[in-house]
Amino acid sequence: MIPESHPRYRSLVTREQMAEAARSGVVALEGLTAHGRGEAFDYLLGEKTSASAAEAERVAAALLKTARHPVISVNGNTAALCAQAIADLQKASGAIVEVNLFHRTEERVAAITRILEDAGCQVLNGPVERFISLDHDRGLCHVNGMAAADLILVPLEDGDRAEALVSMGKKVIAIDLNPLSRTAKTATLPIIDEVTRAVPAITSAFKTMNQEEAEKLTKNPDGKRYLQDAIMTIRSRLDDLLD
Ligand code: PTJ
C-alpha cells in the first residue's frame, strides 16, 4: 500500500500499474526498463510539459487534422499508461488505432486490443503482413493501417521503425522523453514529453483548432528545434542545481 503522503506517490502508483500490466502480459518485461529510462529523463526535464513541447503538441494536432490517413500505433507501455487518452484522441481525430509490437505474440496483441477496446477504442483487426522492411516483428502491419498511412503517431519506442517509416515517405510524430533517442532524432515531429501528458494535450489542441490554423502550423515543422529546446531545458536545470 503506497501512502498518498509519499512525495513520489504518483510515480510509485504508476510503477505499480506497470508492474501489474507486466504480470498480465500487456507490458513486456523489457517495457519496465523502458519506463525507468523515461522516468529518468522526465526527472531531468522537471516532470512537466515545457513550452516547447506544448508547441510541438499543437503541431501534432495540426498534422493529424491535415492528414489523409492518420494512424496511432500502440505498444504495451502506451496501452498500460493511457488507453483512455488514446480512445479520446481517436474519437476527436478519427485516426485509426493499430497495435504494433516489438515483442510480439498473438496473446499480447489480444490483451492490448482488449484494454484499448475496453477504453472505447476501435482497434484495427485482421491479418498483418511485413509491409515495413524490418527484420523484427514491428515490420508487421495492416494493409489499411500503417501500410496505407501518410502520418503515424508513435508514442514511446526504439528508433528503427521511425527511420523505416520516414524512408517510406510517411510523416512520423514521436512521443519520447529522451531527446537523444534515434526515434526522436528521426521523427518528422518529436514531442519530448511524457505520454500521459502529451496525448491529452494533442486531443485538446485538436478540438480547438480550425483547418486554417492547422494548415499554417504544418508548413515547416522544425523537429530539430524541439530536440534542442529539450536539451537546453535539461542543461539549464543542471546548471541551476550547480549554483
Ligand atoms: O510493447 P512492445 O513489445 O512493443 O515493447 C515496447 C518497448 C517500450 C519495450 C520497446 O518499444 C522498447 O524497447 O523501447 P525503447 O527502445 O526502450 O524506447 C522507449 C523510449 O520511450 C525511451 O527513449 C524512453 O525514454 C521513452 N519513454 C519511456 N517511458 C515514457 C517514454 N516516453 C514518454 N513517456 C513515457 N511514459
Image (spheres, rainbow, N blue to C red):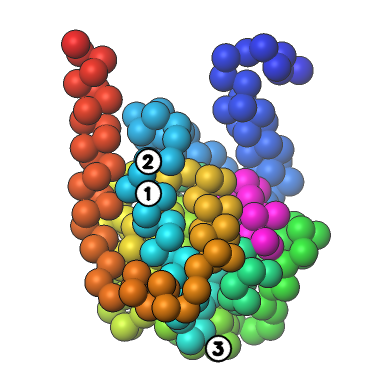
Residue underneath mark 2:
50
Toward the right, the furthest residue is 118
The CA distance from mark 2 to mark 3 is 37 Å
Tell me what residue is drawn at x 26 percent, y 15 percent.
241
Specify whether 235 is left or right of 210: left
What amino acid type should be assigned to the residue bearing mark 3?
Answer: Val
On screen, 230 above or below 83? above
Q: Main secondary structure of the magenta part?
A: helix
Label 2: few (<14), some (14–19) or many (≥20) C-alpha neighbours in 10 Å:
some
Residue 212 got which mark?
none
Q: Secondary structure at mark 2?
A: loop
Quarter of the figure with residue 234:
top left
Q: Is 93 colored magenta in this rendering? A: no
Which image quadrant: the C terminus?
top left
Label 1 or label 3, whichever lies nearer to me, is: 1
Tell me what residue is drawn at x 69 percent, y 79 percent.
125
Residue 143 got which mark?
3
Q: Which residues are magenta?
A: 77-88
Q: Where in the figure is residue 235, as x and y percent of width and height?
A: 21, 30
Tell me what residue is drawn at x 57 percent, y 14 percent.
7
Residue underneath mark 1:
53
Q: Secondary structure at mark 1?
A: helix
From this viewpoint, is residue 26 visible? Answer: yes
Task: Please report contact status of discs 1 and 2: CB closer than 8 Å, yes or no.
Answer: yes
Q: Where in the figure is residue 58, as x and y percent of width and height?
A: 43, 60
| Nearer-the-camera pick, 121 or 23 | 121
